[in-house]
Amino acid sequence: MDSHTVLYGVIGDPIRHSKSPIMLNRAFREKGINGAYAAFHVSPDELKQAIAGVRGLGFRGLNVTIPHKIEVMAFLDEVHEGARAAGAVNTIVNNDGRLIGYNTDGIGYVRSLKEEAEPDLKDKTIVVLGAGGASRGILWALAQEKPKAILLANRTEEKANELAAFFSQESGISAIPWSSLQDVCSYADVVINTTSVGMSPNIDAVPLDPSWLKPGSVASDLIYNPLKTAFLQQAERNGCRIHGGLGMFIYQGAYAFEYWTGEPAPVEVMRATVLESFGK
Ligand code: ATR
């Protein structure tokens, strides 16, 4: 670092578990960019001041994580369409004092799904399990790929109905009953778990019976701890292609890097750095 170093960071509460600093600093180093990225513990009552600090100190960019992704929008100058649809901002770009909020989680997830499992989502039938924040975060980005249908199922069906209704009819997103999952999974091309079922420490739990999925279809899980959930393990044994949640984390950071620097992110180096930090 010197007097030209451009500053970046992530704010959250808690934040000390974050892998973003090692991933983004490694990316800056790889590309020879004079940038530095740190983690800041910011409590909800400090959020407004933290954003004022970004402006005052001229940070070029900030990632925003739990619990600030919604509230931070009130302190920005502009919120991108995809972030508005997701109802959350995870990346801020500071353009000469003008703060613009983006959501790179959803588009990061879709880029990872396309690069790692299914290159073409156009005209595909996609089933999304869960209707919480994680589900809402990826729906807009999935709809941009013009699939044939996005079928949304949630244990509490009313929440799936509400979420489907939030998106316009042209989005192709519709709610389906949880009880119809066995039927729709028999012909779906991609089945995505956005629920917390299977997350450590409950690593044996599955959100639905993986044997319902069509062999050759893609089973995708937003969970990355464990890296290969029970849902993915069983789906793989049944002949499905599988896609884990780590890619979403890597590519949300890749998009942030690209928005801030205007350069392609060194994705493989970023992935290797994060995997190494997991001790793998
Ligand atoms: P997030 O913001 O991470 O999506 P959330 O808003 O708490 O977290 O949503 C969790 C999702 O997991 C919900 O869709 C939830 O279903 P309900 O709305 O019915 O609660 C889903 N979920 C959690 N435990 C589940 C289980 N055992 N079986 C099925 N779905 C479950």
Image: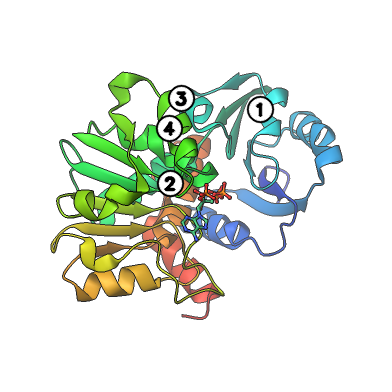
Between 253 and 60, the residue placed more toward the observer is: 253
Q: Is residue 165 left or right of residue 132?
A: left
Q: Nearer the viewer, mark 3 or mark 4?
A: 4
Label 3, label 2: how far apart the Cα atoms are: 15 Å
Queried on whether the Cβ of the residue with tag 2 lies below 8 angstroms from ligand 1, the answer reads yes
Q: Is residue 18 above or below residue 76?
A: below
Q: Is residue 265 above or below residue 241?
A: above
Q: Which residue carries the number 3 mark?
A: 166
Q: Which residue carries the number 1 mark?
A: 73
Label 2, label 1: how far apart the Cα atoms are: 27 Å
Q: Are marks 3 and 4 in contact (CB under 8 Å)?
A: no
Q: Position of residue 107 (x, y in %)?
A: 40, 40
Mark number displayed over residue 154: 2
Q: Give, as a three-letter code, the residue at label 3.
A: Phe
Q: Position of residue 46 (x, y in %)?
A: 85, 39
- Rendered image quadrant of residue 61: top right
Q: Are marks 4 and 1 in contact (CB under 8 Å)?
A: no
Q: Nearer the viewer, mark 1 or mark 3?
A: 3
Q: Residue at x 34, y 45 (%)?
A: 110
Task: Report helix, strand or loop for mark 3.
Answer: helix
Q: Give, as a three-letter code, the residue at label 1.
A: Met
Q: Nearer the viewer, mark 4 or mark 1?
A: 4
Label 4, label 1: how far apart the Cα atoms are: 25 Å
Whichever of callouts 2 and 1 sits on the residue coming sooner in the sequence is: 1
